[in-house]
Image: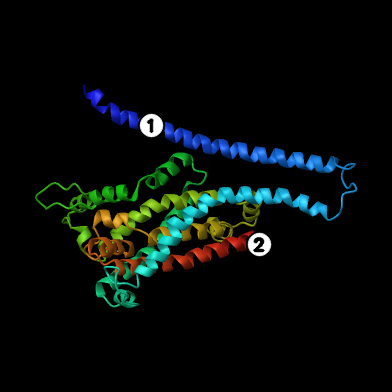
Amino acid sequence: MEFADEAPKLLMLLYGLVAFVVVVGGLLLLLDAIPNHLARRREQRLVAASTAKGGPGGDRPAGDRPTRAARPRRGEALFAAIFLFPAIALLLIGLVVPAVRTTLLSFMDGGSVNWVGLRNYGWMFSQPEILDVLINTLMWVVLVPLLATGMGLLYAVMVDKARFEAIAKSLIFMPMAISFVGAGIIWKFVYAYRSEEQEQIGLLNQIAVSLGGEPKQWLLNSPLNTLLLIAVMVWIQAGFAMVVLSAAIKAIPAEIVEAARLDGVNAWQMFRRVTLPSIRPALIVVVVTISIATLKVFDIVRTMTNGNFNTSVIANEMYNQAFRFGQVGQGSALAVFLFVLVIPIVIYQIRNLRQQREG
């Protein structure tokens, strides 16, 4: 009887799976069949053109050749446009239109009715609590990339060519497989507080009690609580930094390493004069990637403190203003400001990649 009650849901699940297979299979078939079909047609046209009127370079008028040669190019352009259209459409719908709309809302009041100009931006830089949010975000952006990249580089150098390298890398990279919400819950238990009469379940307080100290409510005291939240992000991102930097270290040509050893350099000189200059592009990529991820941090703060006790950051405050307090204009202004902060980092990364290609 229970199975019969669940039959409609199972049938809907089956329909969904069938639809998924049909859609994905159809797309894969198109991606395989259409290029092959166009390639065959192009080959047939080339063969026909080369055999017409006595072979290549026959008595065809000279003005006729560019037109026929341009036809395959027009077909390729049309084919490229067909496949680029979904990506461009999704980019417009998911990024460009919301960005323009958010920018417009940032110049309006909380109800998105009246035009208020730059008032929301003036509010952002005049309210003490919002200034604290900006300072907290600055702390995140400065400390997380530096600490995570530094720890990742340390891991990469120490683990490189070690006996249990694969196992060590797997354990260090494992936090990257955990969502930010999951990581926040895990570390919330690490910082958990109970009174002195109770047994401590938080690792940090248990260590403090074992050393003769008293348990503390770590997440209540500013700015220590922000630093403890930053430690969670560093724990997650250090594994990413280690993987990228370890690959870069392994890509250093063996000839350079051997030449440096023949010159009699010690381990520190090898690291400073050979390893660091060789992996500089990878270091830049890691720092830029972690910086962008840090600017957008929301889950950790939301899960562990809900932005209370002076731990809020821009993304969390943007959510609060727009969805909790009903101040859409102020929330949009924070979103635009966050977008503006990301732009210079992206531009720098693009310029750096172009210089690497040209070099």
Q: Which quadrant holds residue 118? A: bottom left
Q: Earlier in the sequence, mark 1 or mark 2?
A: 1
Q: Which mark is residue 358?
A: 2
Tell me the amino acid under the disc marked 1.
Tyr
> Which residue in the protein does label 1 denote?
15
Name the residue located 85 percent from the left edge and 42 percent from the top edge: 52
> In screen coordinates, is 213 left or right of 283?
left
Q: Nearer the viewer, residue 243 or 89?
A: 89
Number of marks drawn = 2
> In screen coordinates, is 359 left or right of 155?
right
User: What is the quadrant of the C terminus in the image?
Assistant: bottom right
Name the residue located 38 percent from the left edge and 62 percent from the top edge: 295
Q: Residue 206 at x, y = what percent?
A: 20, 49
Number of residues whose C-alpha sits closer than 10 Å to that of mark 1, classed few (under 14), some (14–19) or many (20 or more) = few
Q: How far is disc 1 from disc 2 in space, using C-alphas? A: 51 Å
> Can residue 48 be seen at all in this image of the molecule?
yes
Tell me the amino acid under the disc marked 2.
Glu
Mark whose residue sits in front, 1 or 2: 1
Q: Which mark is residue 250?
A: none
